[in-house]
Amino acid sequence: MTADLSYDPRTGLASGEVAVSSDEEVDAALAAAAAAAPVVAATAPSERADWLYEIADALDVQSTVDELVALADEETALGEARLRMEIGRTSGQLRYYADVAVEGSYLDATIDRTEPGLARAGVPLGPVAVFGASNFPFAFSVLGTDTASALAAGCPVVVKGHPAHPRLSRRLGELTREALAKTSAPAGFFSLVTGFEAGARLVRSEHTAAVAFTGSQRAGLALWRMANERDVVIPVFAEMGTVNPVVVTPAATARLTELAGGFVASFTLGAGQYCTKPGLLFVPSGHNAAEIVAAELEERAPKAWMLTSRIAQDANGGVGELVDAGGTVAGRADGPGAGWAVSATVLRVPIEKLVSGSRLLEECFGPVVLVAEYEDRDQLHAALAQLQGTLTAAVMSTENPDADPDVAETVSRLAPLAGRVTVNDWPTGVAITWAQHHGGPWPATTAPGTTSVGAGALGRFTRPVAYQHVPDAALPPALREANPWQLPRRIDGAIG
Amino acid sequence: MTADLSYDPRTGLASGEVAVSSDEEVDAALAAAAAAAPVVAATAPSERADWLYEIADALDVQSTVDELVALADEETALGEARLRMEIGRTSGQLRYYADVAVEGSYLDATIDRTEPGLARAGVPLGPVAVFGASNFPFAFSVLGTDTASALAAGCPVVVKGHPAHPRLSRRLGELTREALAKTSAPAGFFSLVTGFEAGARLVRSEHTAAVAFTGSQRAGLALWRMANERDVVIPVFAEMGTVNPVVVTPAATARLTELAGGFVASFTLGAGQYCTKPGLLFVPSGHNAAEIVAAELEERAPKAWMLTSRIAQDANGGVGELVDAGGTVAGRADGPGAGWAVSATVLRVPIEKLVSGSRLLEECFGPVVLVAEYEDRDQLHAALAQLQGTLTAAVMSTENPDADPDVAETVSRLAPLAGRVTVNDWPTGVAITWAQHHGGPWPATTAPGTTSVGAGALGRFTRPVAYQHVPDAALPPALREANPWQLPRRIDGAIG
């Protein structure tokens, strides 16, 4: 294959193409990143922040937004309103991660003035290969959260453009290079390459120090295995789609119709193409929950297209697999007639079918969800114990969850499974803040304990080094007596 | 095999045995650990600290010290003075990690009061399987740094006793259980199992949440592969022996004899059985460095035995492998005549033989080292670029390293390779402090960025969970408004 074809999901017809990178082009991008790495690592976070702000500013120019939204909509069919909002999120997170770098806690600078005179700080890992996601062509793609946090942490990035939006990827790459050309950033600070083979070449390169990925379990685990086969194994920070269970407490059944409406709105967002899509709803039995969800679905489901023909095939095939595994279709809302459409589908599933290893407990990417009824708390808890690790888990309670006796117990059962637990919030919104955590236990991520969203995202791309009796001038700036980067530091055990 | 045999390294004769654990015994230990996990996780760090202090106090009882030193010396031949000191280090680090837990920064508690009301803190992973090292029968074994930091972080531990000191391991297990019986710790907080099969069973168990290991690359990587083959992959924190290069700067050649003496003292400590043993000395050419080291070796080398017959065989065989790879024996000091003795050996190696993948760049465990001469800085830097990741790296300079023009450049070349860089300190001493870092890049550790020594050791055993709009009473204590554990917390971005 010499080109990634660009398709319009609304018609399924090709609308352009982007040449894939040659081996030489990939190697040149990697060599430039490797050459840039020590320069970038030695740069003050505040200077790197200027580089990221320059990119963010370029993204926010009105004519650019208009151009990018049109291009993205042609390739993703996610709609203008959503895409416009997503660009704003993307420029905002570039600035946010730049600010986190300037704040400097991510380096965890620590100095023991007592013998043996140790000082420790994070040092950037080196070039990071970023594999973006299809479902957020801005916020988790070329300039998404992995790229922004790696650059902010002081690591050059080589992005592998996503084949679901190749022309948009190329354009974002051009814009980024143009913006960086106005700054002091070295040439290899950011590059974009294209094509499946280019991705494998990135993961296998001796220059690559880490891989960041957002997407499906199949692709993420393939990259993880590839990295584990290297002579020098490198970390793979993959955050992958999961089932994201939601528990409705007994008390909350009083507002089941309202909750069903919220559920439908959440799981049909972006045609269900969210890694945080709530995919499995537990409801106390005796309330016809699946029928209520089905009625809401019929009323509310937006018409939408899937991002790629493969995703559409997998979503349609997934419904069949869920039926084979014990689900029953309770309702559906047909998609648009043409292009890569699927029907939004709600399935009823007997709770005793939810056993570890079942297809029912794996993600079905797209607007497809399960509803399971539980007789009592013991049955609910037994089912929760069967679930895989998941990005998010939610409890839906009454409007006054403080007074709901089931909230605390349910939260404590869900926390061991998830990276984030919400109460009365659907999981699809992921704020970018200090306290955010987006990675869950295996298999939600290949590097449990790490996150691609929130201030913690930067720490993934540094590694602590301790310096013992090293003269001040030979220390990295983070640890010099004069503290030129004005970092918060722990000195002799006290945070300063 | 139904028992681990206990040997006296001074004679090579068996001196006792310890029955290996049955599958049922291993499963019972794991089930108890799993049952204890949520109880331990919910316990205040200060209460767990009391449990660790109780163990430390038991270790410090004079009659116990005498008994343990005698037993350990019988099984390791490391000598009374060293073993007595090591027990002190071991009880000290139990108290240190307890204090780090009470200080509480390791939980990284973070609260955003602004919307969407997120709060995040580390939660303990669950039961940790600990594989100790042969070379520190106290400080890196049953009650070593991995056990102490995992327990302090709130994780139950199941230790797999080391076959190089089986009777000591059993006795330490008994003492620990007796000490904990005086506390409120649940039964599964700590267990010891024995035998090779027991170790594999621990790594494969669904109850095990993480593995901690100190020892050889061969064994560490085998555990890492085994963990990666699980359905639910778990992290393996393995810190493994490396070459630990040392660079003598041109200016420092003025005190080469003094440095050679320090080198010999460092690499023969514990018969060279340190993971931080300096294994490769770079010296400017023209000073007969290998001969000077050989002369010091002849004068100073203590007679010592290796810990096991396999280590002795591997050390002797290793010298042959290094010769085959291009080394030449420059001098040796014979070991004692009986038992598992080896000759301390220094080899000269042409610097151009030091190429990536060569046996010369892999650890030879025991009192065996290489000396390479460099003509100029370019040749030195080219050789450093061939090295593997390593736990430590050192620069030996004049007595005034601030004035040595080569220190800063050499430190900057070594930092990308190492977890710790020292100037004018031999690497064999590893202080337990806030700023310490003991893990290096792959293959020094399977989880780059983590450390088994220093305050950072606790963080390995927790995983962040974010709570969104969760009512105060349903939050873990670390995040409750009242801050019952009195943790340092970041609130709305400000560290408090």
Image (cartoon, coloured by chain):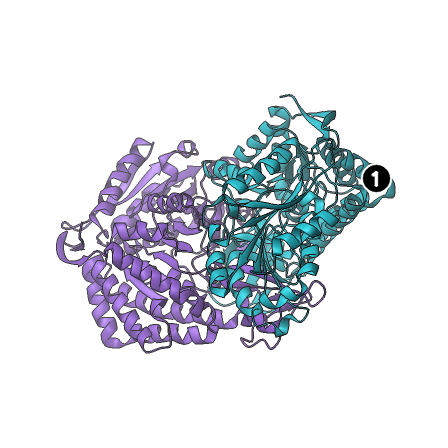
Chain colours: A cyan, B purple
Is residue B332 visible in the rendered structure shown here? yes
In the image, residue A317 above or below residue B451: above
B442 lies left or right of B167: right
Chain under callout 1: A
Question: Furthest-top residue in view?
Answer: A2
A197 lies left or right of B294: right
Is residue A470 visible in the rendered structure shown here? no
Residue carrying label 1: A64
* Quadrant containing the C terminus of chain A in the rendered view: bottom right
In the image, residue B275 above or below residue B473: above
Name which residue lies at 23% across and 51% down: B306
* Amino acid beneath label 1: Thr
B254 lies left or right of A242: left
Label 1: element kind: helix
Q: Residue B96 location in percent, x, y?
A: 43, 70
Name which quarter of the figure residue A160 lies in: top right
Q: Residue B25 location in percent, x, y?
A: 26, 59
Q: Residue B411 location in percent, x, y?
A: 53, 49
Name which quarter of the figure residue B489 lies in: bottom right
* Quadrant containing the N terminus of chain A in the rendered view: top right
